[in-house]
Image: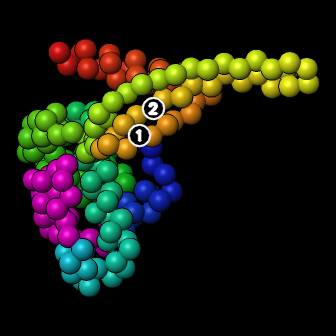
Amino acid sequence: MIDVTPALKETFLFIRDTIPEDVFRKLCTKIAASYPAQKVTKDEISRLSSTLGNEDQCQRAVDTIYYLFNKVSYNTTKPSVVKSFLAPHIGDTHADSFSESWGENAVQIVSRLKTTSSINKTAAKLAWDSSVSISSGECAKLRDPEAVLQVEVEGKLKNVLFDFESLTRFYLELERIQSSIDNLA
């Protein structure tokens, strides 16, 4: 479900060993109620860190909870699967708290994600140009096709230069996005 990196494992240990279950439950409920918006303020994290210690670890714990909600919502994971995944990492009571918050708010979170744009800037104009230059003599071995994508965002024209590999990856990503959009319709 989620690749557990060393940093994530460290944060899981902090959550399991340091954050009391009732505080973790309140934090999960607060985050789930407003997800995908981040409503946990710096003041709240400071208050949490004054109780629990390390502010950096508290910030990472909050970020991890957002990350977990992100992963389970995009995969629409069942609460029981979430609980069984999290229990070995953060303990049974913390896993119960998170999976209950997810189970109670899953429908609202997914519906908010469907209506929320993750991009705050939109392209006003899109133009492309592909130029292949062939040289002669010694430089003939350096032939490198390039494509230039011009995107106008908020009145500013930006050029994006692609080599063959990056253009191919970009095209495949656009195809994947288009198929996802087609599946929604």
Q: Quadrant of the N terminus?
A: top left
Label drawn at residue 118 = none
Figure check: 65 above or below 179: below
Give the structural element (helix, strand or loop) at label 1.
Answer: strand
Dot 1: few (<14), some (14–19), or many (≥20) neighbours within 10 Å? few
For label 2, the residue is 150
Counting from the top left corner in percent of width and height, residue 87 is at 30, 51
Q: How is the image coloured?
A: rainbow
Asked if marks 1 and 2 touch (Cβ < 8 Å), the reply is yes
Give the structural element (helix, strand or loop) at label 2.
Answer: strand
Q: Measure the alpha-carbon separation of dots 1 and 2.
A: 7 Å
Instruction: Give the residue displayed 37% in from the left and 79% down from the top.
Output: 54
For label 1, the residue is 157
Q: Is residue 72 magenta?
A: no
Q: Residue furthest bottom?
A: 50
Left or right? Give the position of 102 relative to 52.
Answer: left
Counting from the top left corner in percent of width and height, residue 171 is at 47, 21
Whether residue 184 is visible: yes
Counting from the top left corner in percent of width and height, residue 79 is at 19, 40
